[in-house]
Image (cartoon, rainbow, N blue to C red):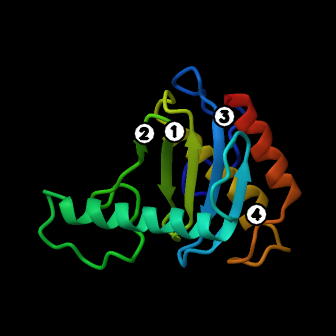
Amino acid sequence: MQFFGGSEISPSPPVPTATGNNAHMMYIFNRNGVCLLYREWNRPLHTLNSQQDHKLMFGLLFSLKSLTAKMDPTNAEKGNLGIPQLPGQGCSFHSFRTNTYKLSFMETPSGIKFILITNPRTGDLRETLKYIYNLYVEYVAKNALYTPGTLIRCELFNTALDQYVRSIA
């Protein structure tokens, strides 16, 4: 059973909400900060090695989640900041934008984090990330040969992800 949506991948993925939707890169982390997948489509400048890049991205996400939990004006009890929250539970962030990129973020109840870096003019990508999560469930999580917590080396998932991301670009 899938967390977001029906029991099968939707035949019609969500349509992007804005023009200029160029996907630059994507990260998938587990709850322990291990980068399970990193994909690039349009990253002209490489300033860090991949291990530093992954640590920096996970640290940024952890810090932003902590900040949003601490700043939540509706909840006096802040709880343990290291545990994943269910969608709709507590205060969370979905994206932020700079003048050069937009970071869109989704965390599943199991602590898997999906990060998509796109053009700053991109609209809301929550439905897009849910669709990518459904691809992950179908091609990775349900794959009997995949061991949870290891790097994602599923060609079907990589192909479906690349085709979908290029279709929204």
The residue under label 4 is which amino acid type?
A: Val
In primary-sequence order, the first of circles 4 and 2 is 2
Residue 50 can be seen in this image:
yes
Residue 47 location, x and y as percent?
A: 63, 55
Residue 9 location, x and y as percent?
A: 70, 45
Circle 3 — which element? loop
Q: Which residue is mark 2?
A: 98
Which residue is drawn at the image coordinates 44% and 62% (left, top)? 61
Q: Contact (CB < 8 A) between labels 1 and 2?
A: yes
Q: CA distance from mark 1 to mark 3?
A: 23 Å
**Quadrant containing the N terminus in the rendered view:** bottom right
Q: Which residue is mark 4?
A: 140
**Label 2: few (<14), some or many (≥20) within 10 Å?**
few
The residue under label 2 is which amino acid type?
A: Thr
Q: Which residue is mark 3?
A: 13
Instruction: Describe residue 87's horizontal placement relative to residue 114 as left or right.
Output: left
Q: Contact (CB < 8 A) between labels 2 and 3?
A: no
Nearer the observer, 41 or 83: 41
Circle 1 — which element? loop
The residue under label 3 is which amino acid type?
A: Pro
In primary-sequence order, the first of circles 1 and 3 is 3
Residue 1 can be seen in this image:
no
On residue 101, which mark appears?
1
Farthest top residue in view: 19
Discs 1/3, front: 1
**Quadrant containing the C terminus in the rendered view:** top right
On residue 84, which mark appears?
none
